[in-house]
């Protein structure tokens, strides 16, 4: 599904989460935020440890994660209006030489300047569709910029405006831990490339798009495949047609929710904790496994709860509850529907009668959908304003800084995936693109 092209004219920012946070901090809004630190500029956090304020602030950031150098003072001190005007001017000067991509979860002040808005895979497709652009500025997080680099031309520079915009979920599957896990599983199952009498290998690795290029490369080298939240079921069918088991990373919830919907019993989905020998499992559980779930999660979607759904149903009789499949299983089970960001958008667009929607995904997208569909009542299940910590790192100040760098002939914050990782990672992506739904299912 292609990303949505936007006109170059900025849109009104009446859905701005940033403005709402400022209102909470100054006391002119009675809503709650998870931390008032969100009212500061993200440059205040670039030199500090951790992911910064927002939903991932309690997560442990891996040693050696990319850091952003200091943003020059003129960008830190510029007003919202000044940055807005400077970004427009820089884009005008660059013309077709640059394409700006904005993820659904970006703040409104950044999305206003995006040529395309979409999920990570749609945006990678938009990057691929613009071979004439010298630079692709990816307003999203690190793994998304890596994927755009994998799919774009070798002479195109993919730029991440703030290098500290990682993803806490992607960081939960570290390549060294994954290699170690594979070795331990190989000791138990035998050679991983040896098929049994039915032509099935012991394990097929599957990684969610929300993972580093190193993990996508690992998967490509070991006969595995990438999935998105839209095609996870098709990809698991592909994997079950080739292997006895699936090793799924990094998001345990997407893996569990998808496999459960396919009929895989919960007791055949052990969790692999990379800090414990054999992931914390005994041999029998691993022998019997159909899906081994990596111990990762998204801290945005983990905030949603069954209590929130119960309250929404109590306060809004007839409410339609739609959540993202990165939410925990009990939340998905309690919702009316679960689907990707694209599914959520289309479900709202397709509603012909005024409807009340309670949505379980990142607040910036929910507020934007509410502003775009005033005929419906749309609200976030989580009453506390708590955006994704790392998406939040992309502020208009950084966008202006990288664009003005390009105008001056300087490429700032280029993301490049080395060839030895990129080649197998592309293989894993290509397998995903050619995977088709299959009747071969699972328990
Ligand atoms: S919303 Fe979750 S998966 Fe997406 S970038 Fe933020 S932490 Fe990562």
Image (cartoon, helix red, strand yellow):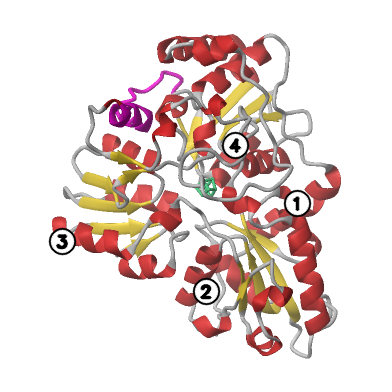
Ranked by sequence position, the earlier of labels 4 and 2 is 4
The mark closer to the camera, 3 or 2, is 3
Within-10-Å neighbours for mark 4: few <14, some 14–19, many 20+ = many
Q: If you read the primary sequence from the N terminus, does the residue marked by circle 3 or circle 1 appear first?
A: 1
What residue appears at the point 49 percent right and 34 percent down from the top-left corner? 392
Q: Is residue 8 magenta?
A: yes
**Residue 40 point in image, percent of width and height:** 45, 26
Q: Quadrant of the C terminus?
A: bottom right
- Neighbour tally class for label 3: few under 14, some 14-19, many 20 plus, Cα within 10 Å: few
- Mark 4–mark 3 Cα distance, whole angstroms, equals 37 Å
User: In this rendering, is residue 392 above or below 395?
Assistant: below
Q: CA distance from mark 4 to mark 2?
A: 30 Å
Q: Which residue is mark 2?
A: 259
Residue denoted by label 1:
214
Q: Which residues are magenta?
A: 7-25
Q: Residue at x 70, y 78 (%)?
A: 243
Where is residue 49, by image quadrant? top right
Q: List x then y, in percent, for residue 128.
A: 65, 37
| Residue annotated with mark 4 | 165
């Amino acid at each position: 599904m292609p990303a949505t092209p936007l006109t170059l004219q900025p849109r009104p920012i009446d859905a701005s989460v940033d403005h709402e946070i400022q209102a909470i901090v100054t006391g002119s809004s009675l809503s709650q935020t998870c931390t008032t630190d969100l009212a500061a500029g993200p440059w205040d956090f670039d030199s500090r440890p951790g992911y910064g304020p927002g939903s991932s602030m309690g997560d442990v950031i891996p040693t050696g994660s990319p850091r952003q150098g200091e943003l020059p003072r003129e960008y830190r001190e510029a007003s919202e209006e000044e940055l807005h005007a400077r970004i427009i001017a820089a884009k005008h000067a660059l013309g077709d030489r640059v394409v700006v991509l904005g993820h659904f979860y970006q703040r409104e002040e950044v999305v206003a300047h995006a040529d395309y808005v979409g999920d990570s895979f749609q945006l990678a497709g938009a990057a691929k569709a613009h071979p004439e652009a010298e630079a692709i500025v990816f307003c999203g997080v690190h793994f998304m910029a890596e994927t755009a680099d994998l799919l774009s031309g070798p002479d195109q520079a993919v730029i991440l405006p703030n290098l500290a915009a990682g993803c806490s979920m992607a960081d939960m599957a570290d390549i060294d831990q994954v290699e170690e896990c594979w070795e331990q599983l190989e000791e138990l199952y035998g050679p991983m490339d040896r098929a049994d009498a039915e032509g099935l290998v012991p394990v097929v690795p599957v990684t969610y798009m929300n993972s580093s290029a190193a993990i996508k490369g690992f998967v490509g080298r070991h006969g595995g495949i990438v999935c998105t939240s839209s095609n996870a079921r098709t990809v698991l069918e592909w994997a079950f047609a080739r292997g006895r088991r699936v090793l799924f990373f990094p998001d345990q919830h997407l893996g569990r929710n998808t496999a459960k919907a396919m009929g895989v019993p919960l007791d055949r989905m052990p969790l692999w904790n990379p800090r414990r020998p054999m992931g914390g499992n005994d041999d029998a559980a691993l022998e019997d496994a159909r899906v081994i779930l990596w111990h990762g999660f998204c801290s945005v979607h983990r905030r949603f709860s069954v209590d929130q759904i119960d309250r929404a149903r109590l306060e809004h009789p007839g409410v339609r509850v739609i959540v993202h499949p990165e939410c925990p299983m009990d939340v998905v089970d309690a919702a009316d529907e679960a689907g990707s960001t694209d599914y959520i958008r289309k479900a709202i667009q397709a509603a012909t009668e005024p409807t009340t929607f309670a949505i379980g995904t990142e607040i910036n997208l929910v507020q934007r959908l509410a502003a775009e569909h005033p005929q419906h009542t749309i609200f976030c299940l989580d009453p506390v304003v708590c955006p994704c910590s790392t998406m939040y790192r992309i502020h208009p100040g950084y966008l202006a800084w990288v664009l003005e760098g390009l105008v001056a002939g300087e490429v700032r914050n280029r993301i490049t995936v080395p060839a030895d990782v990129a080649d197998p990672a592309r293989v894993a992506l290509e397998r995903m693109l050619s995977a088709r739904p299959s009747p071969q299912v699972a328990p």
